Amino acid sequence: MSLPVVVVGDVHGDLERLFAALRPYPPDRVRTVFLGDLVDGGPFGVGALRYARDRPSSEVLMGNHEALMLAALHDSDVRRRWLNTGGERHDLEELRGDQALQDWLRRRPAMLELEDGTLLQHADNDGYWDLAGSGSPTSINQVFAELLAEPGRELEIWDALTPRGMFRRMPGRLDRWLERTGAGRVVHGHTPHSLGRPEVYAGGRAVNFDGGLGRYGRSRFRRLQPVEASVGRLDLTAPWSRS
């Protein structure tokens, strides 16, 4: 039987809250999808990456902060920019000393398509289209693989994914994105919401799992949200299902 899907929104270096959020979901009983931005903002970004990498039945998507961190490894100007976005110097040095983790991180896909028509990706914008010139998840993942394999091009991913809230502010962009990708809905993180559960909007065609899981850099949030705002089981029985 296929495992139920548990989605993890932006962790931003808060390993302790990530552990608490996933405690109800034993790794042998669920399929876990991390939506990216496990790093920056908190002190345990590399630890969160290693945990996500090693958790059984898990998949990790590329976030804009992972792309910027990879760029900071080999560019001092980008490094200063990365520190201003919440990067931790010790995290960067730890990643620098772990070539296997770097190689794994550079192989992270942009998105994941589920059989029910759900498309999981980090950002709530269509900048992926700008990079790939095609809405096919397969072609977008291929372009990401090519960009990440060439040090110095990670900033193209950062620039494309960083704009926030596009699907909510411009519903027509969401409509076109779903049409181009062939998806029934999109599940994302990236833009903090203020609900106590994942934010469902656009008639159920979009779900936001960035409920501010990390306790650090809390100026973005009015209050610390419960972990259930960022981590939870994905409903695969809704009307957008292809079955």
Image (cartoon, rainbow, N blue to C red):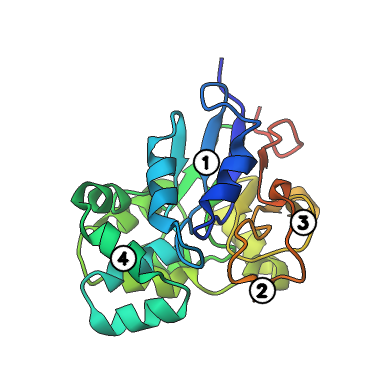
Instruction: Look at mark 3 in the image and give the residue it sits on.
Output: 201
Q: CA distance from mark 1 to mark 4?
A: 24 Å
Q: CA distance from mark 2 to mark 1?
A: 24 Å
Residue toward you, 118 or 31: 31
Q: Give residue 220's mark.
A: 2
Is 116 displayed left or right of 224 in the figure?
left
Which marked residue is nearer to the observer: mark 3 or mark 4?
Answer: 4
Instruction: Look at mark 4 in the image and give the residue it sits on.
Output: 92
Instruction: Look at mark 1 in the image and give the residue it sits on.
Output: 33
Q: Residues within 10 Å of mark 1 (few under 14, many from 20)?
A: many
> Image quadrant of residue 163?
bottom right
Question: As displayed, is residue 127 above or below residue 231?
Answer: below
Which marked residue is nearer to the observer: mark 4 or mark 2?
Answer: 4
Which marked residue is nearer to the observer: mark 2 or mark 1?
Answer: 2
Visible in this render: residue 10? Answer: yes
Q: CA distance from mark 3 to mark 4?
A: 36 Å
What x and y, as percent, mark residue 133? 39, 64
In primary-sequence order, the first of circles 3 and 4 is: 4
Q: CA distance from mark 3 to mark 1?
A: 20 Å
Q: CA distance from mark 4 to mark 2?
A: 23 Å
In primary-sequence order, the first of circles 4 and 2 is: 4
Please, what is the three-letter code of the amino acid marked with disc 2?
Arg
